[in-house]
Image: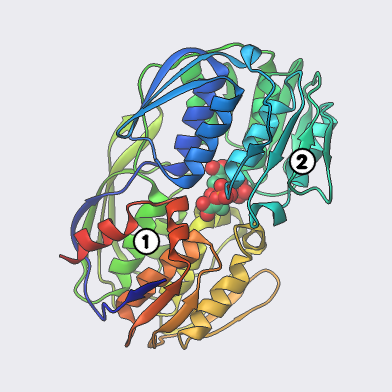
Amino acid sequence: MKILNQRQQPLTGTLQVPGDKSISHRAIMFASIAQGETTIENMLLSEDCYRTMDAFRTLGTEITINDHNVKVTSDGWKSFKRPDHPLYMGNSGTTARLITGILAALPFQTVLTGDESLTKRPMNRVIDPLSQMGAMIESANHKLPITIKGSHLSGITYRLPVDSAQVKSAIILAGLLSDGETVVHQDNITRDHTERMLPAFETDIFTDGSMIKVKGPQSLYAANNLKVPGDISSAAFWIAGAVITPGSKITLNDVGLNPTRTGFIEILKRMNARINIETTHHEGSEPIGTIEVEYSPDLTPTTINREEVATFIDEIPLLALVASQVEGEFTIQHIEELRYKETDRVQAIVDTLSSLGVTVSSRENDVTIRGKASLKGGKINSRGDHRIAMMGAIASLICESTLEIDDEECIQISYPGFWEDMDTLRN
Ligand SMILES: O=C(O)C1=C[C@@H](OP(=O)(O)O)[C@@H](O)[C@H](O)C1
Ligand SMILES: C=C(OP(=O)(O)O)C(=O)O
């Protein structure tokens, strides 16, 4: 439990947030299925990323960690060996979905398990398309634990029924290891780190943004040095904190500014938030830059379009918190996918904000928040969901009294240095 008493303390100063979680997972996975030695700089060493590293070590990859630099040495996917125990995915949906795409095409059986939260999250979204490719995956109710039998796969053409980068990536990875052509169509933009990073491993992949095409089977070769940009989803906590806390003014350096991830900033700008972003350079094919944010007293509501939801999917709890500081009624629409995250985040938003004294209600696919609210403090239950725990910590910046956060250790899942970074910005 964490007790926070930081009433109206502004966030000020400069910070570099840790490496991006989505990119860190992919760097380990792609380096593992490739032949040779890849070095990864600024790797995120969080619980979820350890689950990915543990799984690929069990399959035969050598991974050494020196500070935040990771060396991955592998003979490629054809050399992977059958694990002699179930692979534990912990809390990580990204690990579970993407590795299923790889393991489905390998000639041995693997069992995947997960923690209490992950075993409630849907796997049918990857099992269905992979089965169409010829995969044999057994599960009770399409949830973990699953048994992947390992079979010879053939390419498919598939239109994503949900806006999910995890599903898209699982199919692309399976496609690389399958016979023939695999084509994935998406109706709305989802994060495209897989498409951007794979060419660094000498992979042939074509995309025009709404369609992705790969031909298999392909051998992948180690990438030259990869550098992971700062995680914009981690930066988002400080951005939200600065926007709502009087007196704040912060600069965040070296943050990944991939346009498929910057939805939160775009939306805050539409709401009159005082934010400046500038792309300073690229690492591989990922744009990187600086974000400057100031306290923004004149926020206005905006409309959330379905097409943009995936570009800030993990920041929606934070947007709800910011919405509580906007005059009038603010509806965040089209957020049904939040029900399938670490917790039902639609419900978590309603329960957390209402326990802080905000008038908030939800229907199936949206949440409506009435502002401007004074947050009263008290106690919130993170339910073991890292993003809800950190959203609570940011709410505490403007609470009138002490706030207690249950189960705050879950923050290790995505942001191990969170409390240290909070101290940096409050000094
Ligand atoms: O591909 C990824 O790295 C991720 C995709 C998103 O999930 P979905 O694809 O399920 O929306 C996101 O919520 C998750 O934190 C990371
Ligand atoms: C949803 C998340 O991650 P994952 O799906 O990988 O568990 C998240 O980090 O908010």
Against 383, residue 129 (above or below) is above
Report which residue position mark 2 lands on.
146
Mark 1 CB near ligand 2 (8 Å cut) = no
In this picture, is 249 found above or below 41? below
Viewer-nearest residue: 139 or 229: 139
| 369, above or below 60, in the image | below
Residue 423 shows in this picture: yes
Estimate how packed mark 1 is, as few (under 14), some (14 to 19) or many (20 or more) residues with alpha carbons within 10 Å: many
**Position in image of residue 22 (x %, y %):** 49, 41
Q: Residue at x 34, y 69 (%)?
A: 272
Quarter of the image for residue 282 reads: top left
Question: What residue type is disc 2 on?
Answer: Ile
Circle 1 SS class? helix
At 57% from the left and 19% from the top, the residue drawn is 60
Residue 370 against residue 122 in the figure, above or below: below
Q: On the rendered structure, is 413 left or right of 426?
A: right
Q: Earlier in the sequence, mark 1 or mark 2?
A: 2
- For the C terminus, the image quarter is bottom left
Left or right: residue 44 versus residue 311 is left
Residue at position x 81%, y 18% in the image: 152
Q: Nearer the viewer, mark 1 or mark 2?
A: 2
**Res. 189 visible in picture:** no
Q: Does the residue at mark 1 contact the one at mark 2 (Cβ under 8 Å)?
A: no
Question: Label 1 belongs to which residue?
Answer: 237
Identified by mark 1, the residue type is Phe
Colour style of the rendered protein structure: rainbow
Q: Is residue 363 left or right of residue 15?
A: right
